[in-house]
Image (cartoon, rainbow, N blue to C red):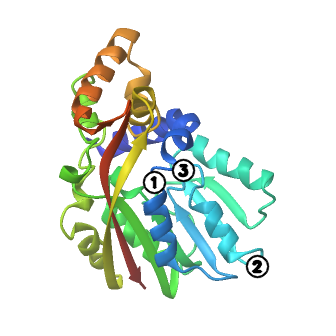
């Protein structure tokens, strides 16, 4: 897919997903989120950049960790996501949080602005991950650190058939190379090639639990990366796609709900 088109798909797709994202993914992504924050080891007063912030599931714990004397700049390609973070920060009286729409490959910040850069499950959607890593490194101070997580190996993510199911019903790829960074040591090698030192990675296995077929489909279709394509399906196409997806995860059915395996890869590096 052309990079410009891919960015457009991601921008407007995540605008569509914003109302559903936390409902279907907040609990399911907690293992990756918690481990990323633990590896970041944020301290009071630090300046943090959260790239691909989504609805702020990492932003707000980071803001609590750095306190009123620190700061968290949260950016996302989706205007709806960034606006959600701005509104929630105001509601929580977290004045140290600022949010804006911004692309990961073109961070509108000066060199050496931040102590820490975080990117939780965002790099899979970026057309040029090496460039995004170079931008993260550019905005870090010398000695600063970055922590990024992605989904792991395709074979270890039981929901992976969502992509071919949707792609068979639209004209172009929904999310090309989604699992590329999670394969082997690709995430670590990409980070190191961008100039990061002391790179280390961890793999985290998890189970995505949904209490009903409706919830499993809501996460896969309305609350995730295929949301833009899904929004254009008519009722019959949606029903057909739901049925095909549920068949693909049938082996994970558990008492009327679903317990779907997943894997994350988390990388840490220093400038």
User: In terms of sequence position, does the residue under pointer 2 or pointer 1 come before the other?
Assistant: 1
90 up-or-down from 236: above or below: below
134 up-or-down from 123: above or below: below
Residue at image position (51%, 32%) is 16
Residue 240 at x, y percent in the picture: 29, 16
How many neighbours does mark 1 have within 10 angstroms: few (below 14), some (14-19), or many (20 or more)?
Answer: some
Residue at image position (69%, 82%) is 44
Residue that mark 3 sits on: 54
The answer, for residue 179, to whether it is visible in the render is yes
Where disc 3 sits, the SS reads: loop
Residue that mark 2 sits on: 69
Residue at far top of view? 236
Task: Tell me which corner region of the image, top left, top right, bottom left or bottom right, holds residue 271.
Answer: bottom left
Q: Are marks 1 and 3 in contact (CB under 8 Å)?
A: no
Q: Distance from label 2 to label 3 (Cα)? A: 24 Å
Residue that mark 1 sits on: 29
How many neighbours does mark 3 have within 10 angstroms: few (below 14), some (14-19), or many (20 or more)?
Answer: many
Q: Distance from label 1 to label 3 (Cα)? A: 12 Å
Q: Relative to 103, is 61 on the left or the right?
A: right
């Amino acid at each position: 897919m052309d990079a410009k088109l891919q960015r457009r798909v991601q921008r407007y797709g995540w605008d569509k997903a914003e109302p559903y994202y936390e409902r279907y993914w907040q609990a399911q992504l907690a293992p990756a989120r918690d481990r990323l924050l633990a590896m970041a080891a944020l301290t009071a007063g630090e300046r943090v950049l959260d790239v691909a912030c989504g609805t702020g599931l990492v932003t707000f714990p980071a803001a609590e960790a750095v306190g009123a004397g620190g700061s968290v700049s949260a950016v996302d390609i989706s205007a709806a996501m960034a606006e959600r973070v701005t509104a929630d920060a105001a509601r929580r009286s977290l004045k140290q949080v600022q949010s804006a729409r911004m692309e990961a490959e073109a961070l509108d910040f000066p060199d050496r602005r931040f102590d820490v850069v975080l990117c939780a499950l965002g790099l899979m959607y970026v057309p040029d991950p090496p460039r995004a890593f170079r931008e993260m490194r550019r905005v870090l101070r010398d000695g600063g650190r970055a922590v990024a997580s992605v989904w792991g190996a395709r074979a270890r993510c039981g929901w992976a058939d969502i992509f071919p199911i949707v792609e068979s019903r639209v004209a172009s790829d929904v999310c090309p190379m989604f699992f590329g960074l999670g394969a082997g040591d690709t995430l670590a090698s990409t980070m190191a090639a961008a100039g990061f030192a002391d790179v280390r990675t961890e793999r985290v296995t998890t189970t995505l639990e949904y209490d009903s077929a409706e919830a499993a489909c809501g996460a896969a279709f309305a609350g995730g990366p295929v949301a833009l394509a899904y929004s254009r399906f008519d009722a019959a196409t949606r029903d057909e796609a739901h049925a095909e997806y549920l068949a693909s995860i049938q082996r994970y059915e558990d008492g009327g709900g679903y317990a779907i395996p997943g894997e994350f890869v988390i990388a840490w590096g220093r400038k």
